[in-house]
Each structure stands twice: as C-alpha cells, then as structure tokens.
Image: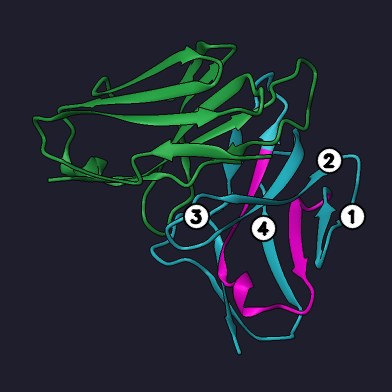
Chain colours: A cyan, B green
Amino acid sequence: GESVGLHLPTLSVQEGDNSIINCAYSNSASDYFIWYKQESGKGPQFIIDIRSNMDKRQGQRVTVLLNKTVKHLSLQIAATQPGDSAVYFCAENMNSGYSTLTFGKGTMLLVSP
Amino acid sequence: DTEVTQTPKHLVMGMTNKKSLKCEQHMGHRAMYWYKQKAKKPPELMFVYSYEKLSINESVPSRFSPECPNSSLLNLHLHALQPEDSALYLCASSRRRSGDHTDTQYFGPGTRLTVL
C-alpha cells in the first residue's frame, strides 16, 4: 500500500512533453481501475478506465497501462497542455458486490508553457 | 450526459447549526455516494446508497445523516459539526447494474464546507 504523506507527489513538465503518472494499487483482487483528474475547486472528473483482463487502453491523448504482476497502473498523457494541470488520482474497484472505490494518494501535474 | 449537481457550492456554518447538502443526478443511476475530501488528500467514502437503501456506512459519526428521498436525489444532513469536519463534500453516482464490474462513478463539483 501507499503511505500517507504531507505533500502530494508532483510532476512538472513543459507544454508539449509527454507525461507519465504512476500508481501502485493495493489489492490483487481489484478488477477495475479508473483514472480521475481533479482541478482546483472541482470534483474528480473521469478520464479513462481499464478492466483487469486488459493491459492497455487508449483514449484521446491518454493511455492507461496495467501491470497486474507488480500491481502497477500508469497514465500517459501525450502532448501535455497547460489545461492538463491538475491532481490525478487512480482508483481501484475490488469486485466486492458494491462499487466501492479505493483512491490512491494522487499526483499533482504542473504544466508550464 | 454525465452530470451530477450539488448545492450549495459553498457553506459556512457554526457548530450549533443544522444544514443540508443536496445532490441530484438524472442519469438513471441507482447507486449514489457521499465522500469527504480534505485538502491534498484523496476522497474518503462516507456512505453508499444502492436502490435508495443505505448499503454502506463507513463508520461516519452520527452528526452526519444521509437521506435518499428518491433515485435521483441524495441529501446529507449536518448537525453539531466540529471545525475538523471542514472539507469538500463530494457526491457521486453510478449505474449499479447487477454483475457489472465496471461500475464507473461520476462525481459532482462538491460543496466546500467550513465549520466555525
């Protein structure tokens, strides 16, 4: 599992760069994963999801990779833009009969022009 | 349309006040959730309603009282809160189809609560 820290991990990139945000999830029984983007003062916004029977899924400018062997999830953002600046959370859904999400601690992405 | 709405956007209340937070969705979702989020932290689950019945209460103090009047509405009644309850309160909803392992939750914008 991930430890609770006082500060959010931060990734700083230049506009146009590709960004990779990583997440270690906690439960090997989790079968569905979601990436959310949260801008300051707003609620989490769904970006992309992936089921445990897949190892890669692509969206518009975003790709999620899943490595179940090491319980690792990553979000790749191509050609990062200033509007991508936000906190990104991974969330895992263990198939317990209810849709209860366990969130990672989040990564702040800062994109400079 | 994946919109969840929440009112009010901001709320300031004293420790003796009674107030309510409201959440609404018109996506036909049958599960609704309340989360609490402190600054620089991930959302923490408080309550889950499934088909208008409370299915999960994550050991939340009784000064928080949820209510689900119908499948589109979710309320959170607040009474005798403490300053440490100040946070962003998020509502979410999901389809909650039986056997659906990909039950995506969609979040509202949240209510920023300050308890004085």
Asked whether residue A26 is in view, the answer is no
Mark 1 — residue? Answer: A56
* Relative side of A103 to B5, left or right: right
Which of disc 2 and disc 3 is earlier in sequence? 3
Q: Rate crowding at label 1 as few (under 14), some (14 to 19) or many (20 or more) other CA atoms within 10 Å.
A: some
Label 2: chain letter: A
The amino acid type, in three-letter code, at marker 1 is Lys
Percent coordinates x, y for residue A95 in the rendering: 73, 26
Q: Earlier in the sequence, mark 2 or mark 1?
A: 2
**Chain on which label 4 sits:** A
Please name the residue that numbered disc 4 is placed on.
A23
For label 2, the crowd category at 10 Å Cα-Cα, with few meaning under 14, some 14 to 19 and many 20 or more, is some
The amino acid type, in three-letter code, at marker 2 is Arg
Identify the residue under disc 3: A3
For marks 4 and 3 on the same chain, the one whose residue lies earlier in the sequence: 3
- The subunit carrying tag 3 is A
Magenta span contains residue A82: yes
Dot 4 falls on a residue whose secondary structure is strand
Asked if badge 4 and badge 1 are on a common chain, one would say yes
* Pointer 3 or 1: first along the chain: 3
